[in-house]
Image (cartoon, rainbow, N blue to C red):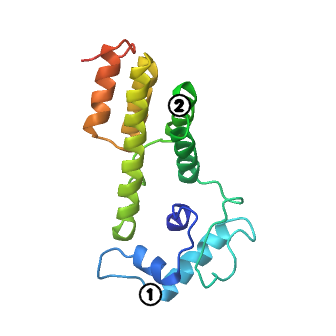
């Protein structure tokens, strides 16, 4: 269940699951449908990863048992923001390398749209910051790569297209045309 994977380590209650599984503002699934979704997820995961019953706080995929690219991206991005220079570029590059396409492409629905928006913004911001810093230290190749990876997750973002153009003008080896 995508909702648990992108919950950023925060348990999700049954009521919140119902709200976030909604196909529209006024069409929430019933509690039995939520239980069916959780049961299907439990069956797909290794035994014990998702407890038989949620706690009072809700359901959570334990970070130690389930690796989620979004969690890894966030951790690498946070580490990158605490360092400078080549170390920052390396960590940010590793985070951006996790991006393989638009966030939850073809899997969005009303209840998850806000999370998709925030994830897309985070990708765009990290890519733009990384490209700018790479250009500032003369690494046009890394700036171009950051812009390209950012556009995979945040297609159509003007500042990332501009970053790629700036990188090409600075000698990244990519064509400006």
Count residues near mark 2 (Cα–Cα under 10 Å), then give few for <14, some for 14-19, many for 20+: few
Which residue in the rendered view is the most extreme toward the right?
47
Q: Which mark is residue 6?
A: none
| Spatial CA span between label 2 and label 1 | 49 Å
Residue 21: tell me if it is visible.
Answer: no
Image quarter for residue 104?
Answer: bottom left
Q: Residue at x 44, y 24 (%)?
A: 134
Mark 1 burial class by Cα count in 10 Å: few <14, some 14-19, many 20+: few
User: Can the viewer see residue 155 in this picture?
Assistant: yes
Q: Tell me: 151 left or right of 62.
A: left
Establish if 4 lies above or below 176: below
Asked where in the image residue 140 lies, by quadrant, the reply is top left
Quarter of the picture holding the N terminus: bottom right
The structure residue drawn at horizontal position 58% and vertical position 79%, both measured from the top left corner, is: 58
Across and down, in percent, residue 4 comes to: 55, 67
Q: Viewer-proximal residue, 27 or 69? A: 69
At mark 2, the secondary structure is loop
Which residue is at a point 51% across and 40% down the rendered structure image?
Answer: 81
Task: Name above or below for residue 144 compared with residue 157.
Answer: above
Q: Which residue is mark 2?
A: 84
Answer left or right for 38 relative to 144. Answer: right
Q: Position of residue 174 (x, y in %)?
A: 36, 16
- Residue 30 is marked as 1
């Amino acid at each position: 269940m995508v909702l648990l994977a992108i919950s950023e380590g925060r348990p999700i209650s049954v009521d919140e699951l119902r709200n976030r599984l909604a196909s529209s503002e006024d069409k929430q699934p019933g509690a039995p449908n939520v239980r069916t979704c959780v049961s299907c997820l439990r069956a797909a995961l290794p035994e014990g990863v998702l407890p038989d019953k949620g706690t009072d706080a809700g359901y959570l995929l334990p970070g130690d048992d389930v690796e989620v690219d979004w969690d890894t991206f966030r951790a690498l991005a946070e580490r990158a923001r605490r360092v400078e220079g080549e170390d920052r570029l390396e960590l940010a590059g590793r985070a951006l390398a996790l991006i393989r396409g638009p966030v939850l492409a073809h899997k969005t629905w009303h209840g998850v749209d806000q999370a998709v928006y925030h994830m897309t913004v985070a990708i765009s911001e990290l890519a733009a910051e990384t490209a700018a810093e790479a250009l500032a230290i003369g690494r046009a190749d890394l700036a171009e790569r950051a812009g390209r990876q950012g556009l995979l997750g945040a297609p159509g973002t003007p500042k990332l297209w501009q970053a790629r153009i700036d990188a090409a003008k600075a000698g990244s080896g990519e064509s400006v045309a």
